[in-house]
Image: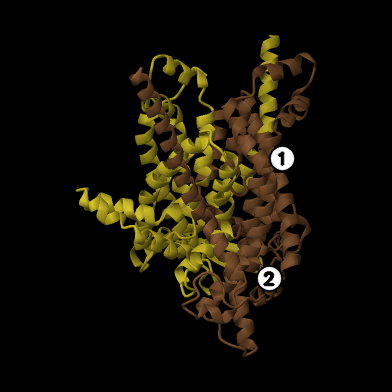
Chain colours: A brown, B yellow
């Protein structure tokens, strides 16, 4: 009798201590994730004089909207935001659409050299973009369709730098930023869809295309949302490709990258004041927050489908 | 005969589905890769009418490895960073995935929060973060310094040392704890992959082991770990690449300086990144050979 009671008690103690331990860890790590955002938020309203006051640690003593005003003006914020949202969404849709087709092809069909091509997908993921960026830049600087365009032009190739075409071309052909990862995840998902789905569709007389569009894609909706979200965010924050392909574009990442330098040169030209590193940090942190907020908002709206797709692709593994 | 026809039709359909990738691979990726190799062993003369290449042999490779003042050191440093970070990231993300896979109150909220680094520590935002960490100035602007302030209050190092743990191990652990912010930011995708892997384990395995009277600890090592092990390899590979291509990597900084403004030199740029890539490839081969011996593949699926 007592041993049974003891056992039940010890089980309960273990359960409670495990959940206490879990909450401590979860809370701690959540704190690390949220803390920089809180800091940035507080700095957004900090007046310049507070930076030099060591008694001000986090919460500003003098409330001001100057930072916000300077950054919004310097980044041309609302125009850039709109541009970035539209552009990134467009690229994300292209990448998702084409990566889905490729991932599906790898998952559901048997064809010669399949292993080889999949290894090549992995290779595109493995090779850092820095290795191939210089030739890619040259390719798009003097773009040519196998010598076809040059025949009509006085000079060699067409200059695509400064236009969205380098992004569009690499998205359509699935060699954009981390597209290999998308193909990998999508293949993983479709590999687990039961064969009966396809067979039933075949019996009903559906061809490959209609099986794909009518049966397979609607089932993968939450994964599509996830992949689009990833592609969108990575395009939104991308500075590497953007600084090569569209260095002067009105996009948030470009604006944020040059925010401090632009501000510095403008202030020096106007002889207002010198910009020190503390003030630069303040401005950069406000700029970063303004870039973060829209994607955070989108993420919170879409997060249910995001986590759902993790579960779904997990179950079918 | 009919069966064969269906088979070849399916093969053709497969090629149609993956054709975008084949086009991109051949005309964009492979082309760029080969040209990159050519750039690295040539002098490039740029004119209005495009560019011409003049073969220069291994001059640029010699230059960056023997003449360049800091490239070698950066290579070693980034290799060291990676070797330190990879085990920490893998352990952390595995641990977190196991925890997020359990049922508890507020799980969906926590999941949402935990994946925000996937979104927030990319591209320009990551670059800005590193920038403010380097600059200092604004008190507490750099998250890392203020966080090491927190851990400083609770002196983990001396507690571990008083437990007679080897100083080298203690140093590794404390530096891991202090860079937890960085680790969290690097672990997003890996956590996701592990979580997917954990959820793909069939519950019947656990049911069977529960009947046999196995403890949670045994389940962990005899079921969870082997079933997840293929994804450990995936994650290690991903982490290595991620840490090699991130902006706070010393070699990346070298490459950034070469690719800027007046010092722009494509031959330097490509030869630096090629040597760098070869180093990554070497590391990845070594790691995957070691790991693939330990990986368990569930082949009856």
Q: Secondary structure at mark 2?
A: helix
Relative vertical location of residue A158 with respect to residue A100 in this rendering, above or below:
below
Q: Give the percent coordinates (x, y) of residue A137.
A: 61, 59
Residue tagged 2: A75
Cα separation, mark 1 vs mark 2, equals 32 Å
Find the residue positioned furthest to the front: A1
Using the image as rendered, state which of residue B80 and residue A1 is in the foreground. Answer: A1
Using the image as rendered, state which of residue A49 and residue A81 is in the foreground. Answer: A49
Q: Residue at x 60, y 40 (%)?
A: B108
Left or right relative to B29: residue A54 = left
**Residue B20 visible in the shown view:** no
Return the chain for callout 2: A
Q: Residue at x 60, y 78 (%)?
A: A62
Q: Give the percent coordinates (x, y) of residue B162.
A: 21, 52
Residue tagged 1: A97
Q: Give the percent coordinates (x, y) of residue B83.
A: 36, 49
């Amino acid at each position: 009798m007592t041993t049974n009671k003891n056992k039940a008690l010890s089980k309960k103690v273990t359960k409670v201590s495990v959940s206490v331990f879990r909450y401590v860890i979860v809370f701690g790590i959540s704190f690390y994730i949220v803390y920089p955002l809180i800091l940035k938020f507080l700095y957004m309203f900090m007046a310049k004089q507070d930076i030099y006051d060591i008694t001000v640690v986090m919460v500003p003593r003098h409330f001001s909207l100057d930072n916000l005003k300077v950054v919004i003006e310097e980044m041309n914020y609302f125009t850039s935001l709109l541009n970035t949202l539209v552009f990134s969404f467009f690229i994300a849709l292209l990448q998702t659409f084409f990566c889905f087709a490729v991932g599906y092809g790898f998952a559901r069909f048997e064809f010669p050299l399949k292993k080889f091509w999949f290894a090549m997908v992995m290779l595109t993921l493995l090779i850092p973009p820095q290795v191939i960026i210089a030739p890619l830049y040259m390719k798009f600087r003097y773009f040519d369709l196998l010598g076809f365009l040059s025949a009509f032009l006085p000079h060699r190739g067409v200059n695509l730098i400064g236009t969205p075409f380098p992004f569009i071309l690499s998205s359509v052909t699935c060699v954009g930023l981390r597209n290999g990862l998308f193909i990998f995840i999508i293949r993983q998902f479709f590999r687990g869809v039961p064969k009966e789905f396809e067979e039933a569709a075949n019996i009903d007389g559906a061809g490959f295309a209609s099986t794909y569009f009518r049966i397979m894609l609607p089932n993968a909706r939450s994964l599509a949302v996830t992949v689009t979200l990833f592609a969108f965010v990575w395009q939104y924050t991308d500075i590497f490709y953007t600084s090569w392909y569209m260095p002067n574009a009105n996009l948030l990442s470009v604006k944020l990258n040059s925010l401090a330098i632009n501000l510095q040169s403008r202030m020096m030209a106007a002889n207002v004041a010198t910009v020190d590193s503390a003030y630069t940090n303040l401005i950069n942190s406000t700029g970063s927050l303004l870039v973060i907020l829209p994607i955070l908002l989108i993420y919170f709206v879409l997060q249910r489908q995001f986590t759902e797709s993790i579960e779904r692709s997990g179950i079918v593994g | 005969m009919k069966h064969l026809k269906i088979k070849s039709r399916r093969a053709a359909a497969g090629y149609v589905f993956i054709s975008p990738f084949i086009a991109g691979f051949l005309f964009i990726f492979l082309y760029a890769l080969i040209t990159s190799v050519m750039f690295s062993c040539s002098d490039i003369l740029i004119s209005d009418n495009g560019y011409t290449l003049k073969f220069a042999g291994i001059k640029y490779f010699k230059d960056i490895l023997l003449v360049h003042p800091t490239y070698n050191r950066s290579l070693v440093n980034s290799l060291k960073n990676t070797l330190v970070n990879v085990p920490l990231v893998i352990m952390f993300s595995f641990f977190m995935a196991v925890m997020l896979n359990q049922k508890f109150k507020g799980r969906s909220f926590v999941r949402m929060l935990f994946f925000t680094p996937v979104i927030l520590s990319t591209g320009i935002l990551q670059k800005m973060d590193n920038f403010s960490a380097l600059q200092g100035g604004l008190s507490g602007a750099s998250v890392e310094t203020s966080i090491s302030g927190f851990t400083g209050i609770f002196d983990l190092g001396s507690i571990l040392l008083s437990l007679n743990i080897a100083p080298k191990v203690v140093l590794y652990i404390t530096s891991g704890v202090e860079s937890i912010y960085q680790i969290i930011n690097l672990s997003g995708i890996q956590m996701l992959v592990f979580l997917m892997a954990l959820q793909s384990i069939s519950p019947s395995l656990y049911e069977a082991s529960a009947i046999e009277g196995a403890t949670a600890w045994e389940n962990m090592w005899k079921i969870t770990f082997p079933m997840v092990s293929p994804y450990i390899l995936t994650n290690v590979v991903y982490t290595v690449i991620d840490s090699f291509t991130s902006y706070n990597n010393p070699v990346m900084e070298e490459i950034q300086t070469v690719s800027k403004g007046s010092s722009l030199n494509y031959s330097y740029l490509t030869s630096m990144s090629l040597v760098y890539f070869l180093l990554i490839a070497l590391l990845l081969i070594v790691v995957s050979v070691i790991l693939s011996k330990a990986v368990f593949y569930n082949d009856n699926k």
